[in-house]
C-alpha cells in the first residue's frame, strides 16, 4: 500500500522530512526502534542503572570506626537485617502495611459498591471526581492537615469532646500497641493518617471491578433463589477480589515505603523508609541503606506474586 | 434482581466516606484564613486575608515556589516527549519484550518512592554528580513518564487506526498524517497527561528529599516548616496554595479526557 502511494503521488514535496517519514512508514521495525530508543535509554541508563548500582552497593563494606565505605564485597549488610533491632523495624512496617490495606479495603468497598451499582450519569461523575481530588491533592499537605487535626486542642479533639467520646478515646489509647499518650503520638493516629492518604487508591480498582460485573449474573442469582445477602457473599464479593487485590498493591506498597507520615505522626521508632533515610543521610552508611531498600523490593515482589494469582493484574 | 434503591446503611457509608476524604482538605482551606497566629484551635476565631500578604512577601516562599515550578515544567516536558514516544511505539504492534517495557515504565510509581530516590542518589554519588536542580528534574521526569504514557496510549486505543490509513490513502505522507490527523486527536490527552505530570512533580517529596542536595522545593520547604510552630499561619497559606495547584489539574484533566474510559489519573 505504501509503495503505490509513493508511486502515484508525483506532485508531492520531496523534502528531507517527507522522505524520512515515508521511509519510516515502509520500515515499521526501524520506526519502532527509533521511537523506543529515547525512553529505553532514559529508563535503562538512569532508572535500572541506578537500581543496580544501589543493589551492588549493598555488598560494600562500611567501617563503623572510620565511618567510611570500602568497595570490598560482603554479605554482612544483608545478614544485619535479621538482627533483632532491624527485624523489629521490618515487622513494625509490614504489620502497619497489612493493617492499613485491610482497613482501606473495608472502608473503600461500600463507597466503590455504591458508585458502581447505584449511581449513573452526573452522580457517578461527581463521585469519580470526589475520589480523584483527594487522591491527587498534595501528599505533604494532606499529611500536614492531619498533624493539625490530631494536635492537642485540634479539630479531632474538639469533635471527641463535643460528642462525649472522651472515655472511648482514652480506652482506645490505653490499648498497648495501638495507643499512646495522645492521638498524634499513637499508632492509632498514624494508622488513621495512612488509611486516609491511601484510601482513594483502593476505591478506584474495586469500583472498576464491580463496574465490570454483569447485572445478569445478579438476576440469575436471584432467580435461583438466593437472598440479597447470599448473592452478595457468593457472587459479588468473590468477583470483586481482583479489584481489592489490585487496590491493596498500592496501599501495601505505599505504606511500606513511606517515611514522611511515620516521622510526623505516631510513636518514635523507625519504619523501613525512615531507616533507609537515616542510614544514608546522618550515618552515611549507604551499604546498609541499600540492604534495607532490598526489603520492600523483596516484600513487594512476593506480594505481587500472591495477588497475581487473585487476578489483580487484570483489574489494574 | 436486587432492589433498585441502596439501603440507608450503604448510602451512609458511601457519603460518609466522601466526607472523610474531603474533611482534612476543607480544614486546610479554613485555616489559611484563620486570624490566630500560633494555635490552631477549633473552631477558628475569625477570618482574614492578612497571612496571604505575609506569605507572598517572604523570599524563601517565593524561591521555593519558583524552583518547584521550574522543576515541574522541565520534568513534564521530558515526560511528555518520552511518554508519547513510548505510547506510539507500544499501542499497536506486539513484539518481544513489550510487556517488560510497559512494566519498566510503571515501576517508578509502583515501587515506593524511597527506592527510586535512594537508587538515583547512589548512582549520582557513584558518578560524582552533585545533587541539585538537574538531579531533581531527572528523578521527577522518570516517574512522570508513565502518567503521560497512560493518557496517550488510552487515547490511541480509542482512536481508530483506519483514520491513519485513510489519511495515507488520500495522499498524505507520514509527517502530514502526524501533523493533521494524529496530533489533533492526541492533543487533549497530551494536555491532560502533562497537567497531571506537572501536579505530581510539583508535589513530590519522597524522591526529592534524596535527590535535592541543598535545593529546597516547595514540599521540602513545607516539611521543614512543620518544625516551626511560630510560622504556622504562613505554612497554612502555602499549604492551601499547594493543594490548589495539585487539585486543579485533576479537574482539567477530567474534562479533557471525559467521554470514553478516561484514564486521567487512575493509578498515580
Image (spheres, coloured by chain):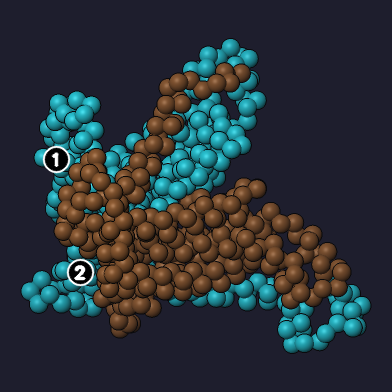
Instruction: Quarter of the image for the N terminus of chain B: give it.
Output: top right
Determine the image quadrant of residue A186: top left
**Chain A drawn colour:** cyan
Residue farthest along the top direction in this orientation = A225
Q: Nearer the viewer, residue B89 or A288?
A: B89
Name the residue that disc number 2 marks.
A281
Determine the image quadrant of residue A258: bottom left
Q: Nearer the viewer, residue A238 or A195?
A: A195
- Give me the residue at 73% from left, 84% from top: A17
Q: Nearer the viewer, residue B260 or B43?
A: B43
Counting residues from the start of the chain, the first of labels 1 and 2 encountered is: 1
Name the residue that disc number 1 marks.
A182
User: Label 1: chain?
Assistant: A
- Give me the residue at 61% from left, 49% from top: B258
- Give me the residue at 57% from left, 18% from top: B3
Kindly identify which numbered label has been placed on residue B244.
Answer: none
Residue A47 in percent (x, y) is at: 42, 70
Q: Nearer the viewer, residue B63 or B223?
A: B63
**Relative to A269, A315 lies left or right:** right
Amino acid at each position: 500500500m505504501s509503495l503505490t502511494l509513493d508511486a502515484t503521488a508525483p506532485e508531492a514535496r520531496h523534502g528531507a522530512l517527507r522522505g524520512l517519514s515515508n521511509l519510516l512508514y515502509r520500515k515499521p521495525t526501524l520506526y519502532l526502534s527509533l521511537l523506543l530508543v529515547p525512553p529505553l535509554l532514559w529508563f535503562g541508563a538512569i532508572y535500572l542503572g541506578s537500581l543496580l548500582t544501589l543493589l551492588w552497593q549493598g555488598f560494600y563494606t562500611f567501617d563503623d570506626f572510620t565511618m567510611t565505605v570500602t568497595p570490598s564485597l560482603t554479605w554482612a549488610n544483608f545478614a544485619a537485617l535479621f538482627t533483632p533491632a532491624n527485624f523489629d523495624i521490618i515487622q513494625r512496617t509490614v504489620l502497619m502495611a497489612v493493617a492499613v490495606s485491610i482497613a482501606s479495603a473495608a472502608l473503600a468497598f461500600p463507597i466503590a459498591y455504591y458508585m458502581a451499582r447505584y449511581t449513573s450519569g452526573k452522580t457517578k461523575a461527581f463521585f469519580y471526581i470526589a475520589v480523584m481530588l483527594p487522591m491527587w491533592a498534595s501528599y505533604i499537605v494532606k499529611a500536614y492537615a492531619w498533624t493539625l487535626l490530631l494536635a492537642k486542642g485540634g479539630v479531632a479533639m474538639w469533635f471527641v469532646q463535643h460528642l462525649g467520646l472522651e472515655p472511648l478515646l482514652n480506652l482506645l489509647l490505653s490499648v498497648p500497641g495501638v495507643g499512646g499518650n495522645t492521638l498524634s503520638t499513637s499508632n492509632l493516629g498514624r494508622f488513621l493518617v495512612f488509611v486516609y492518604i491511601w484510601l482513594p487508591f483502593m476505591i478506584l480498582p474495586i469500583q472498576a471491578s464491580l463496574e465490570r460485573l454483569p447485572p445478569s449474573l445478579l438476576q440469575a442469582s436471584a432467580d435461583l433463589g438466593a437472598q440479597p445477602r447470599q448473592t452478595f457473599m457468593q457472587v459479588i464479593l468473590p468477583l470483586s477480589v481482583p479489584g481489592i487485590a489490585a487496590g491493596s498493591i498500592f496501599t501495601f506498597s505505599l505504606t511500606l515505603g513511606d517515611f514522611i507520615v511515620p516521622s510526623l505522626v505516631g510513636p518514635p521508632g523507625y519504619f523501613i523508609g525512615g531507616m533507609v533515610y537515616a542510614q544514608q543521610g546522618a550515618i552515611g552508611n549507604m551499604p546498609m541503606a541499600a540492604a534495607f531498600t532490598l526489603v520492600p523490593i523483596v516484600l513487594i515482589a512476593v506480594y505481587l506474586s500472591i495477588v497475581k494469582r487473585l487476578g489483580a493484574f487484570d483489574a489494574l | 434482581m436486587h432492589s433498585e434503591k441502596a439501603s440507608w446503611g450503604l448510602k451512609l457509608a458511601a457519603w460518609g466516606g466522601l466526607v472523610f476524604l474531603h474533611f482534612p482538605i476543607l480544614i486546610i482551606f479554613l485555616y489559611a484564613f484563620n486570624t490566630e497566629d500560633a494555635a490552631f484551635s477549633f473552631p477558628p476565631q475569625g477570618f482574614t486575608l492578612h497571612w496571604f500578604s505575609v506569605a507572598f512577601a517572604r523570599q524563601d516562599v517565593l524561591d521555593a515556589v519558583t524552583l518547584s515550578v521550574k522543576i515541574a515544567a522541565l520534568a513534564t516536558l521530558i515526560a511528555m516527549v518520552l511518554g508519547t514516544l513510548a505510547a506510539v511505539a507500544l499501542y499497536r504492534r506486539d513484539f518481544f519484550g513489550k510487556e517488560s517495557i510497559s512494566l519498566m515504565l510503571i515501576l517508578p510509581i509502583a515501587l515506593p518512592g524511597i527506592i527510586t530516590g535512594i537508587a538515583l542518589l547512589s548512582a549520582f554519588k557513584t558518578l560524582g554528580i552533585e545533587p541539585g536542580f538537574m538531579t531533581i528534574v531527572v528523578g521527577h521526569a522518570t516517574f512522570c513518564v508513565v502518567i503521560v504514557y497512560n493518557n496517550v496510549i488510552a487515547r490511541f486505543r480509542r482512536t481508530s487506526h483506519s483514520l491513519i490509513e485513510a489519511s495515507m490513502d488520500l495522499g498524505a505522507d507520514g509527517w502530514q498524517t502526524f501533523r493533521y490527523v494524529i496530533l489533533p486527536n492526541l492533543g487533549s490527552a497530551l494536555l491532560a497527561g502533562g497537567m497531571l505530570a506537572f501536579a505530581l512533580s510539583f508535589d513530590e517529596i519522597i524522591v526529592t528529599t534524596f535527590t535535592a542536595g541543598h535545593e529546597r522545593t516547595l514540599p521540602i520547604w513545607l516539611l521543614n516548616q512543620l518544625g516551626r510552630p511560630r510560622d504556622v499561619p504562613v505554612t497554612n497559606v502555602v499549604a492551601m496554595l499547594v493543594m490548589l495547584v495539585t487539585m486543579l489539574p485533576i479537574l482539567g484533566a477530567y474534562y479533557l479526557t471525559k467521554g470514553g474510559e478516561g484514564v486521567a489519573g487512575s493509578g498515580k
